[in-house]
Image (tube, grey):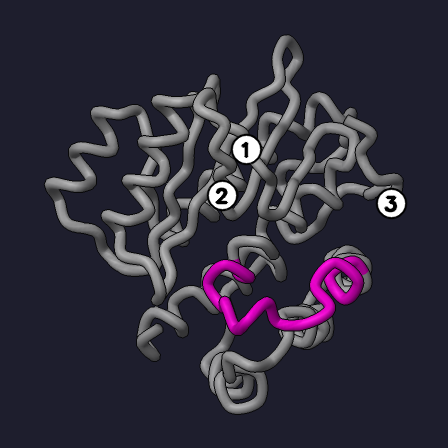
Amino acid sequence: MSENVSHQNFEILFKHLVGRNPTKEEAKEYAQELGCEHRHPAEGLEWMAQKASLRRAEVLRQLVSYLRVAMPNNEGGRRFENQVRMLLEGVRWEFPNYVNVKYQPRIELHNGEIVIPDFEFAHKTQHAVFRYLIECQDRKRSSNDVADKIRKVKSLSSWNLFLFIHNRPIPKPLKKALDADGVNAMSFEGFANFMSNTKLTLYPLAGSQLDKRRQDELPEIHLAKPQW
């Protein structure tokens, strides 16, 4: 991952989890102390919790505890995938009765082949449950490889909601082909916006009393894991 992309993703993650943009000093501190790929994602969250408001800090520390168990190591140094996972798990812990996340689920295709995407993300609405399979672009796989994998699952299974989160710009012809196939391809920033919009649909369902004028705060969370 290039330094510029890594810095941009850090700013997006910081804003989404802490609720504000990082200062230049904070960005420099993070790059020097926690920007190395071998550092566990929970270490970055612990650092962010120190920069957050009291309510957000509480949420982040609970998420840190979960990630320490769920990710006993750094998953082979998959930094971008871990960043995506932190956004997913943050929303899951905020809405445990309405959101579920599975890491590397096993999907059996109609021909008996087993395919393992990066994530399954599901969230409830008032009338339905939406389930997405998520694939992340990383250093080891080209955009075309990921797109081919998604197309295979789409054609040989009942799954029809897919997110392709890319860490580097993808060729326009590939983006056009994915759009035609009904695959939502987006950057990390686009994914963060997608998750923010999803949260807006969940607040009324969860009965949150969140004051819309106070976006720096989070609603109360409950640590019971989802049963669905």
- Closer to the camera, 4 or 201? 4
Q: Are the two marked residues, 1 and 2, in contact with CB atoms closer than 8 angstroms? A: yes
Q: Disc 3 designates what residue? A: 223
At 51% across and 84% down in the image, what residue appears?
36
Q: In the rendered structure, which disc, 1 or 2, sits on the residue that comes first in sequence? A: 1
Q: Disc 2 designates what residue? A: 117
Badge nearest the viewer, 3 or 2: 2
Q: Does the magenta stretch include residue 168?
A: no
Q: Distance between the residues labelled 1 and 3?
A: 28 Å
What is the quadrant of residue 52 in the picture? bottom right
37 up-or-down from 93: above or below: below
What amino acid is found at the position of numbered circle 3 in the picture? Leu
What amino acid is found at the position of numbered circle 2 in the picture? Pro
At 42% across and 32% down in the image, what residue appears?
162
Badge nearest the viewer, 1 or 2: 1
- Residue lying furthest top: 127
Query: Residue 76: image x %, image y %?
Result: 55, 71
Q: Disc 1 designates what residue? A: 107
Q: Mark 3: few, some, or many residues within 10 Å (few <14, many ≥20)?
A: some
Q: Give the range drawn in magenta.
A: 66-83
What is the quadrant of residue 172 in the picture? top left
- Closer to the camera, 137 or 223? 137
Q: Is mark 2 on a helix, strand or loop?
A: loop
Q: How far apart are marks 1 and 2 (CA)?
A: 8 Å
The image quadrant where one finds the C terminus is top right
Query: Residue 80: image x %, image y %?
Result: 46, 63
137 up-or-down from 43: above or below: above
Q: Is residue 217 left or right of residue 164?
A: right
Q: Is mark 1 on a helix, strand or loop?
A: strand
What amino acid is found at the position of numbered circle 1 in the picture? Ile
